[in-house]
Image (cartoon, rainbow, N blue to C red):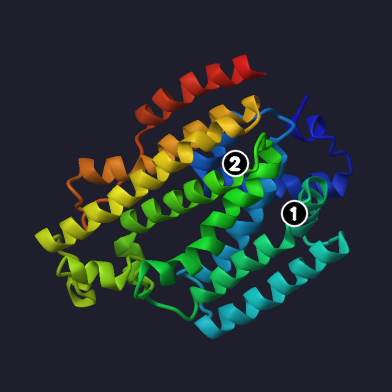
């Protein structure tokens, strides 16, 4: 039985929307997509729907090849997202991505406020280039990452309300790991996602970052950020046991692979300006195969 049929999705137009979301996931989020394969078939399409929405909005904002100005991107994002939010409120959509998202949100009772928060953060990307403090950054990270975890929990199945707090922390850890890896790419976009005040505590200025030369000060600042990712991952770990057993292997694998980005950064001695830290195929297999066996046993 295919995933959509297992999930009870039979309408041809709705199936096409879910397939488009799955395509976006498999194309742009390979690690995330790999983790979804550890879920029961009946859960996977709904995770794809969440990814499809987030990826489509993110592409409007971050497509470096786009000829649009930031203001024009903001106008496009506002027009598309306002339509999606209205569709969520109505409970119906004709948008190629929105159809699957509305169906998922309706089935699982996911709060619309999470999607509004996500759009708010995407809009911030077009007007905010740096964050002075960690608290300032958390306004952005809540909408861009924490809410993704909160949206996922109803699909994964919560056995305790505490699962939501853990999911929020794990979502933040994923995002912070990406920020550390992508400092150079973000500079290309005119943005810095490492808190300016914390950089300054290590003697790092924006100008130093922009020189793209790893100094002892920058390395020290990156190591402090890496420590935060690992702390959040540890704090989130007990929450995995608060999910339905069939969902746990997926999140365990996602946690190890996404937070494992910081391990890869350390393996290249924090040389993030010269190399892109990425999880090797071998490591993915070492994580995925045992997780697959655990997932099969849980089912």
- Image-based side of 195 in relation to 1, left or right: left
The quadrant in which the C terminus is found is: top right
The quadrant in which the N terminus is found is: top right
Residue where numbered disc 2 is placed: 163
Q: Which mark identifies residue 235?
A: none
Crowdedness of circle 2 by 10 Å Cα count: few (<14), some, many (20+)?
many
Residue where numbered disc 1 is placed: 101
Q: Residue at x 13, y 62 (%)?
A: 217
Residue 244 vertical position relative to residue 20 in the rendered view, above or below: above
Q: Residue at x 42, y 37 (%)?
A: 257
Q: Secondary structure at mark 2?
A: helix
Residue 167 vertical position relative to residue 217 in the rendered view, above or below: above
Q: Residue at x 87, y 44 (%)?
A: 12
| Quadrant of residue 130 within the rendered picture | bottom left
Residue 69 visible in the current orientation: no
Q: Secondary structure at mark 1?
A: helix
Which mark is first along the chain, 1 or 2?
Answer: 1
Crowdedness of circle 1 by 10 Å Cα count: few (<14), some, many (20+)?
many
- Image-based side of 69 in relation to 10, left or right: left
| Quadrant of residue 131 within the rendered picture | bottom left
Residue 27 pos. (x, y %): 55, 46
**Number of marks in the rendered image:** 2
Q: Nearer the viewer, residue 155 or 48?
A: 155
């Amino acid at each position: 039985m295919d995933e959509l049929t297992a999930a009870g999705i039979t309408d041809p137009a709705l199936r096409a929307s879910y397939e488009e979301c799955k395509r976006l996931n498999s194309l742009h989020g390979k690690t995330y997509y790999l983790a979804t394969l550890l879920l029961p078939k009946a859960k996977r399409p709904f995770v794809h729907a969440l990814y499809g929405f987030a990826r489509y909005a993110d592409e409007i904002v971050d497509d470096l090849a786009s000829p649009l100005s930031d203001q024009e991107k903001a106008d496009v994002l506002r027009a598309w997202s306002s339509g999606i939010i209205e569709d969520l409120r109505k409970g119906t959509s004709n948008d190629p991505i929105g159809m699957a998202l509305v169906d998922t949100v309706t089935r699982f009772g996911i709060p619309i406020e999470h999607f509004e928060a996500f759009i708010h953060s995407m809009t911030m990307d077009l007007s905010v280039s740096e964050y002075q403090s960690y608290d300032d950054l958390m306004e952005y990270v809540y909408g861009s990452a924490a809410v993704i975890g909160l949206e996922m929990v109803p699909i994964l199945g919560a056995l305790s309300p505490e699962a939501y707090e853990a999911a929020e922390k794990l979502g933040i850890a994923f995002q912070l790991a990406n920020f550390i890896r992508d400092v150079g790419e973000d500079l290309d976009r005119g943005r810095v996602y490492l808190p300016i005040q914390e950089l300054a505590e290590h003697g790092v200025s924006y100008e130093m970052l922009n020189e793209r030369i790893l100094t002892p000060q920058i390395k020290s600042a990156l190591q402090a950020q890496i420590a935060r990712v690992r702390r959040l991952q540890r704090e989130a770990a007990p929450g995995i046991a608060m999910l339905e057993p069939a969902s746990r292997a997926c999140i365990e694998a996602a946690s190890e692979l996404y937070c494992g980005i910081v391990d890869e950064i350390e393996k290249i001695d924090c040389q993030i300006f010269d190399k892109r830290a990425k999880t090797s195929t071998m490591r993915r297999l070492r994580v995925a195969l045992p997780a697959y066996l655990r997932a099969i046993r849980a089912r």
